[in-house]
Amino acid sequence: MSHTPETSAAPLQADPAHSAPAGGPAEAPAAAAPGAEVKPASHDSSLPEALVAFMLERWTPASGELPQAIAHADVFAARRRALSKLFPAETLIIPTGHEKVRANDTHYRFRPGSDFFYLTGNLEPDCVLVLQPQEGGGHRDILFVEPNPGRSDKTFFTDRAKGELWVGPRLGVEQSRAHFGVDECRGLPELDAYLSGLVGTVTRPHRVLRGMSERVDKLLARHDRDKQLGEALSEMRLLKDDLEVQELEAVVASTKRGFEDVIRALPRARSEREVEGTFNLRARVEGNDVGYGTIAASGHHACILHWTRNDGALEPGKLLLVDAGVEGNALYTADITRTLPINGKFSKEQREIYEVVLEAQEAAIREVKPGNDFMEPNRAAMRVLARGLERLGILHVSAEEALKEDRQLYRRYSLHNVSHMLGLDVHDCAQARQQVYKFGKLKAGMVLTVEPGLYFQLDDETVPARYRGIGVRIEDDILVTETGYQNLSSDIPRSVSDVEAWMAGLWATPK
């Protein structure tokens, strides 16, 4: 790794050397069980029996030593115990998900399901965590994982989906039990029989985290009670512990370095793709990946909220909106937006819009405190934006009129609320109940974004011509503390003068 050896001193993660990551839209076909015939690809040659026999010979025997426990195994175990207490005497099934097909037989890089990872620290695809109720109370952890037959079975070199010469080694069953600190591990070939045993003449009460594994969803009928498992996991994740905050601080620091890489590249860069590639290199060097598709929006593209095509030109005199975040090896992600003048100096009109957005953000951040409504930062920001729009002659009614609940005319130019939770997912804790999240109270340990914006479309005739095509968003990651807030990204310049000085300083001392 380049700037820093890790994204944190002791990350909440499994050993990536034992993973075969991949992830995206359609599930990959299930890999063959050990010993089964594997369908070759259309471009494969046949395998003579003599070659198969030769491939199975003379490999150094595995040591038989069990791996060390994952860092912070006690934290993952405590989370499982906390979940156990919420659903006594019920079997809980939490899959991680599968590799996803990108095109034909190629796959996206796997990214574990957030809830599964939160409970296990396991990065491998296909695994399923089961919390099995015990007679004396509590639950027993059973982790279903891919067996590793080593060099004793030809699939190690014939199976394109699971074979370790194709995708790297899996830990195996006993190794996973030791590494992840669970009570028991079983091979994935046993999963279907286990889940089928939960239903029959007497159905055992169970809940499934839905939408992660088509295989699991098909085996167990959907019940209304399943939703409560997803809600419970999201609500557990709303409050970050000290280790999670450390991970977020680390990825925010890495994200700042990514923004600085982008700024250094701007004098020679010609396209948004160069911005995306420059930032994404930092994410892969220092972390697992980007936490979401990088938005590199120059000029009027900044008025499209989720512009990820990133195929536009960079033009001096225009603004560049970069919304990006490094996802660390422990899968926590930053989510930062900075709007930069491509030539290093804001124009008069750009500065006028930028300073309204910054004032709105500062007003919103001041409302991040325990006991406040989650929506209070949004209300504060919208009041400032509406007043600014009136002052600039863009709103043709008063700010007070535009802010009325039955009108909300300012939203033509602001489009979105200013906050969402942040953590393992960029839009974290999405299954939490509305009364706990959107309509709930802020609590110490929550981490949320604050990201107001103003967007003036090129063809919007309600906007003075001098402002059309300008889009500005400023976003920071804010921790709710016992007494107020901590801006985790305060080290990344925000004001007009600070941004201009930041850019000039980096250009004066290029790396």
Image: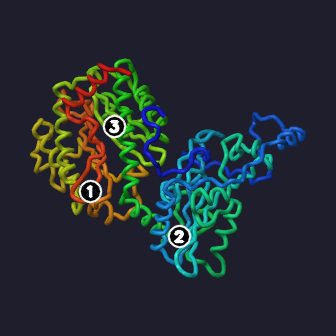
Dot label at residue 481: 1
First reached walking from the N terminus: tag 2 or tag 3: 2
Crowd rating for badge 1 (residues with CA inside 10 Å; few <14, some 14–19, many 20+)? some
**Residue 346 % position (x, y):** 21, 26
Dot label at residue 29: none
Dot label at residue 207: 2
Closest to the camera, between mark 2 and mark 3, is 2
Determine whether 322 is above or below 149 in the image.
above
**Residue 403 % position (x, y):** 15, 51
User: Which residue is nearer to you in this view: 118 or 411?
Assistant: 118
User: What residue occupies the far right of the structure in this picture?
Assistant: 50
Distance of label 2 from label 3 (alpha carbons): 40 Å
User: Which residue is nearer to you in this view: 186 or 201?
Assistant: 186
What amino acid does circle 2 point to?
A: Arg
What amino acid does circle 1 point to?
A: Thr
Q: Are marks 1 and 3 in contact (CB under 8 Å)?
A: no
